[in-house]
Image (tube, grey):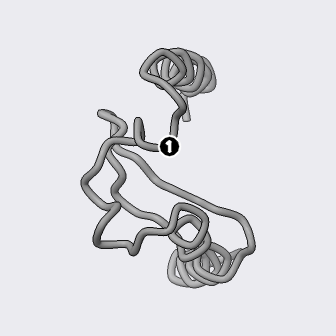
Amino acid sequence: MVKNNQLSSRFKQVFFNTGVAIMIVDKNRTLIEVNPKFCEILGYNKDELIGNSAEMIHISNQTFKEFGEKAFKQVRNKKL
């Protein structure tokens, strides 16, 4: 059985050391956490990204809206 603090430690290791860009958003799709690879790919530092809308990574407002509808529908259906 993995304890919560072990899981948290493993999550942090993966989140901060992976070669994959990861962002975490709130229900309004505002960036609340980003990993170093995400910053590197976008060319911003963490402080410049946190608090901004995830719309900044989409090519248009339309793709931002479409992605949000699909993504949140999946989350609601799986009840994550």
In the rendered structure, the answer to whether residue 11 lies left or right of residue 32 reads right
Residue 76, visible in the rendered structure: no
Q: Name the residue that disc number 1 marks.
A: 57
Measuring 41% from the left and 42% from the top, which residue is drawn there? 56
Q: Is residue 38 above or below residue 2?
A: above
> Percent position (x, y) of residue 75?
56, 27
- Note whether 55 is above or below 50 in the view shown: above
Per the image, label 1 sits on a secondary structure element best described as helix
Residue shown at 36%/37% (left/top)?
Answer: 29
- Examine the rendering and report whether any part of residue 75 can be seen: yes
Apparent side of residue 1 relative to residue 59 in the rendered image (left or right): right
Residue lying at the far left in this picture: please name it: 51
Quadrant into which the N terminus falls: bottom right
What's the amino acid at mark 1?
Answer: Ile
Name which quarter of the figure residue 70 lies in.
top right
| Residue 4 horizontal/vertical position (percent) | 53, 75
Looking at the picture, tell me which residue is in the foreground, 73 or 33. 33
Q: x, y (%) of residue 78?
A: 63, 25
